[in-house]
Amino acid sequence: MKIKSLGIVTLVLLSLSLVTVPATVSGQSKPKTQKELLRALPDKYRKWLEEEVVYIISQKEREVFLRLENDRQRDIFIEAFWKQRDPNPNTPENEFKVEHYRRLEYANKHFGKESPGPGWRSDMGKIYIMLGEPQSTEKYENLYDLYPTIIWFYQGMAEYGLPNAFSVVFYKPDGMGEYRLYSPIKDGPMKLMPHYSGDMTAYAEAFSKLTDIEPNVAKVSLSLIEGEPLTDLVPSISSDVLINQKIPAAPTYKVRSTYAEKLFRYQDIIEVEYTANYIDSDALVSVYQSPSGIYYVHYLIEPKKLSLERNDNNYQTTIVINGIVTDLESKPVYQFDRRIPLNLRGEQVSSIRDRQMSFQDVFPLVPGKYRLSILFKNFISKEFTSLETTLNIPERQLQISPVLLSTRLSRNSQYRGLNKAFLLDDLQFSPTPRNDFVPGDRMYAFFQVWGLTPQLRNSGSLVYEVVRENGEVVKNFSKKLSEYTDGNVFYEEFVLEGWVPANYTLKVNLQDGNSNVLAGGKANFFISHLPALPRSWVMTQPVDGDNSAVVQHALGLQYWNRKDLPQARRYLEAAHKKDLAEPVYALDFCRLLYFEEKYQELLKIALPFINQGNKDFLEIAGQSHQALRQYQQAIDYYKQYLSYFGTNINVLNAIGECYYQLGDMDEALYAWERSLQIEPNQAGIKDRVKAVKDKKK
């Protein structure tokens, strides 16, 4: 099918970003200082960092850039740096970048003429690059009793964390040289007057004299902030904060530096075309137990924007998920990949344009302590985001699962026997990662209690308390565990009608029959002043349930990676028996059987697949025959493997060993020497070759 028209439509969505721990430079045992890293930069990258973007790069971005190890990484970072600041990603031109280099050129052309350095280094050049053209300029350069003074007035920059209206003042100390940035606290009005001879701390006196000379200059001499009330005519501390903190922070005020850390963290494991396209996201992860006792990780990711490809009135993309669970020693326990197409009609896109997309998913996980990392990739736009968190799934310990807050609750029985994100039994929750509500909303707090004994279920209770940020207890009550009828799912509804907009904390404690607190949890939330909040639209798909081969196989692999062989066998065998025709389940079960030295059982499973033309079983069949000392059969399977998959050092070495055991030294030498041609650094194989050659002499 020919596509008549293509375009990228971006749905811009609000988000909070995740916080990550900075990575360390690989292979570097002793961290270098920033000065050392800066000196090691090639000239063009040092110039970019120290001259071109010196006033608009955040400290975090600078730190990450200095940790990059090669020019490819630096080029990708620079591309990402500008993309994060592009006000309109749908246009080919980056308006921010164009404006920045215009300011830089203007500063070099018009400022710094009375000093040896370039214009961008001057105080006026620095402010101009950071804030741009002032709304108005006042110059006082020829007054006898006033050093040359220039006032730049700015307005309407509150979105950058600045006052709504303020001035920046420059003057020439001693009436000569370059204009210098004026500070009401550091300089004071007396520094603006060449003939002032009074007390240098008598601000009121100096202000009065300056008012007689030029009222407009006097007006900004104590405060740069328009309309700021002053008492006792002393310099404004807020003005000092403005010029030393707020203005330098303005260029990065709306830039989330999270992308820099994510780019650094994932640069070696994501495709090159994704690396410069990190987008912020909000995320939520929790763990729940199914009625049969299997734990599942439920998660959601809400990217800041979602780009779709347009084909007439159809909008589409493909979401690619790469997940990895590692133990606390960074050893992989489980990896999974999902690829989900998304197709929307034009009217659907219109209805969700101002709402976030919430991708939600679920996967099983055996008890233990882990780190979870998930990459979310938009295949069409090559944008990516991620979530990272730790997980603690107890074996038998009494514990309350994370307390989550939902904006909606419904009963949904159509997915019985399947798993779906945040569907517990037949209760479908809609959690919000921001925990944001408005007055009048219904808020549902939900969780599970793991490790409950029958006695505790009969005698225990849950105590709820909601506390406002000022310490006021807004609501508290208790409820017997026996009053809850939805299995191991506990939830409460809170009607927020009449609740004051503020930050709140919900605390939940589990108590025994003697009011002893056994476990607890809490959730923070806030009620907005807004009359309504846009709610996310959900993209999710139900997945197979507890008794499926998919879940049994996943649990088997996890136990295998955790070195729990009895449990690994139980689940891998169950997965294979549930779907005897699936080669993936059969092959993983065969690998376990090989480890258990059950070669005959392995071959009964593997050989039918080989006879059907499945080449994936050739190597393990060869290994099994070799272990059974059936060397010629092993060689036959190994050679079939090489003819299909190509050269493999381990297989060549195994062929050499089989020929050696058969007494065919020439063929053994031929296989081992081919292996050494590919990888010369094999001391053991070198010794075998030497020993055989010596024996033949």
Image (cartoon, rainbow, N blue to C red):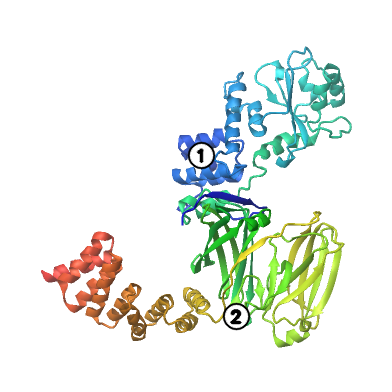
- Give the secondary structure at mark 1: helix
| Residue 29 seen in the current view | no
Q: Could you say where residue 230 lies in the image, as x and y percent from the top left?
A: 86, 33
Where does label 1 land, which residue?
Answer: 38
Type of amino acid under label 2: Gly
Q: What residue lies at 63% left-to-right and 27% top-to-bottom? A: 125
Q: Could you say where residue 634 lies in the image, as x and y percent from the top left?
A: 26, 77
| Residue 105 seen in the current view | yes
- Viewed as shown, does residue 597 lie left or right of 58? left
Image height of 486 relative to 471, above or below: below
Q: Residues within 10 Å of mark 2 (few under 14, many from 20)?
A: some
Q: Nearer the viewer, mark 1 or mark 2?
A: 2
Image height of 632 relative to 533, above or below: below
Q: What residue lies at 49% left-to-right and 37% top-to-bottom? A: 45
- Viewed as shown, does residue 369 lie left or right of 577? right
Viewer-closest of 498 and 599: 498
Based on the displayed image, in which of its 4 quarters is residue 478 positioned? bottom right
The residue at the far right in this view is 232
Where does label 2 land, which residue?
Answer: 417
- Give the secondary structure at mark 2: loop
Q: What residue lies at 60% left-to-right and 68% top-to-bottom? A: 391
Q: Could you say where residue 183 lies in the image, as x and y percent from the top left?
A: 74, 29
Q: CA distance from mark 1 to mark 2?
A: 58 Å
Based on the displayed image, in which of its 4 quarters is residue 450 positioned? bottom right
Q: Sequence order check: which comes first, mark 1 or mark 2?
A: 1
- Viewed as shown, does residue 472 lie left or right of 508? right
Q: Could you say where residue 486 lies in the image, as x and y percent from the top left?
A: 72, 81
Q: Residues within 10 Å of mark 1 (few under 14, many from 20)?
A: some
Q: What residue lies at 78% left-to-right and 18% top-to-bottom? A: 193
Type of amino acid under label 1: Leu
Task: Look at the image and tell me in which quarter the C terminus lies.
Answer: bottom left
